Image: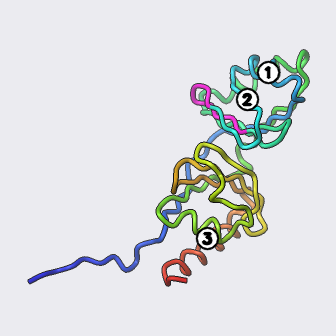
């Protein structure tokens, strides 16, 4: 007798909420970027969408004078202290925004399709190892492309129920072949 196993309830992509991580919003004039990067012990990329990792900290350039910094809980206080210590010599804004956002991971063969259904931006054009601020439906998000079919999406906590509802609808549509 031949038997075949079928998983008729398989999700078209994996959606998971990632653990909380310390994050900071950094604003500094481009002329002061290198000096502040040295003071903070970070690499601050110059090109919008570019990411850089220094130790366990990751910096994403969101604009000509704006970066999103992810770090570890162990480094959080040291980063804040370094920013405070550098402020007199290098004016900047370093604000902890850890509780503002939730990070979702979308992965699997149809993760790109799911994101494309909710984003006006050409998600496929986001290169692996880069990220972009964009809209998902009506919510501002940051999309990190970690692999061909692996993405992280930073969503403001208040928009999470809306984004999850949209992703749930997309999941149903993809499961039915729409």
Mark 1 residue crowding within 10 angstroms, few (<14) / some (14–19) / many (20+): some
User: In which image quadrant can residue 98 be found?
Assistant: top right
Label 2 sits on residue: 44
The residue furthest front is 125
Question: Is residue 13 left or right of 28 when viewed as pictured?
Answer: left
User: In which image quadrant can residue 74 be found?
Assistant: top right
Question: Which dot, 2 or 3, sits closer to the camera?
Answer: 2
The residue furthest left is 1
Task: Kindly state the secondary structure of the residue where label 2 is placed.
Answer: loop
**145 versus 27 height, above or below:** below
- Say whether residue 100 is magenta: no
Q: Position of residue 128 (x, y in %)?
A: 58, 47
Stretch of the chain drawn in magenta: 53-60
User: In which image quadrant can residue 62 be found?
Assistant: top right
Q: Quadrant of the C terminus?
A: bottom right
Question: Is residue 37 left or right of 111 when viewed as pictured?
Answer: right
- Which callout, 2 or 3, points at the residue further toward the start of the chain? 2
Label 1 sits on residue: 34
Q: Quadrant of the N terminus?
A: bottom left
**161 versus 73 height, above or below:** below
Question: Which dot, 3 or 1, sits closer to the camera?
Answer: 1
| Residues marked 1 and 2 touching at CB (< 8 Å) | yes
Choose between 3 and 94: the one closer to the eye.
Answer: 3
Mark 2 residue crowding within 10 angstroms, few (<14) / some (14–19) / many (20+): many
- Say whether residue 55 is magenta: yes
Label 3 sits on residue: 167
- Which callout, 3 or 1, points at the residue further toward the start of the chain? 1
Seen at 77% across and 41% down, the residue is 48
Q: Position of residue 156 (x, y in %)?
A: 74, 56
Seen at 64% across and 55% down, the residue is 153
Choose between 96 and 178: the one closer to the eye.
Answer: 178
How far is the residue under mark 2 from the one under mark 3? Answer: 32 Å
């Amino acid at each position: 007798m031949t038997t075949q196993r079928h998983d008729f309830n398989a999700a078209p992509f994996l959606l998971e909420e990632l653990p909380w991580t310390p994050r900071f919003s950094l604003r500094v004039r481009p002329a002061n970027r290198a000096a502040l990067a040295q003071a903070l012990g970070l690499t601050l990329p110059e090109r919008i969408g570019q990411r850089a990792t220094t130790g366990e900290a990751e910096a994403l350039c969101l604009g000509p004078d704006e970066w999103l910094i992810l770090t570890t809980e162990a480094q959080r206080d040291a980063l804040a202290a370094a920013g405070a210590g550098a402020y007199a010599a290098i004016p900047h804004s370093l604000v902890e925004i850890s509780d503002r956002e939730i990070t979702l991971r979308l992965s699997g063969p149809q993760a790109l399709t799911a994101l494309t259904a909710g984003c006006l931006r050409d998600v496929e054009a986001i290169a692996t190892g880069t990220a972009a601020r964009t809209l998902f439906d009506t919510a501002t998000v940051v999309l990190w492309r970690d692999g061909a079919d692996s993405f992280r999406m930073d969503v403001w906590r208040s928009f999470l129920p809306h984004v999850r509802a949209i992703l749930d609808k997309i999941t149903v549509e993809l499961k039915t072949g729409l």
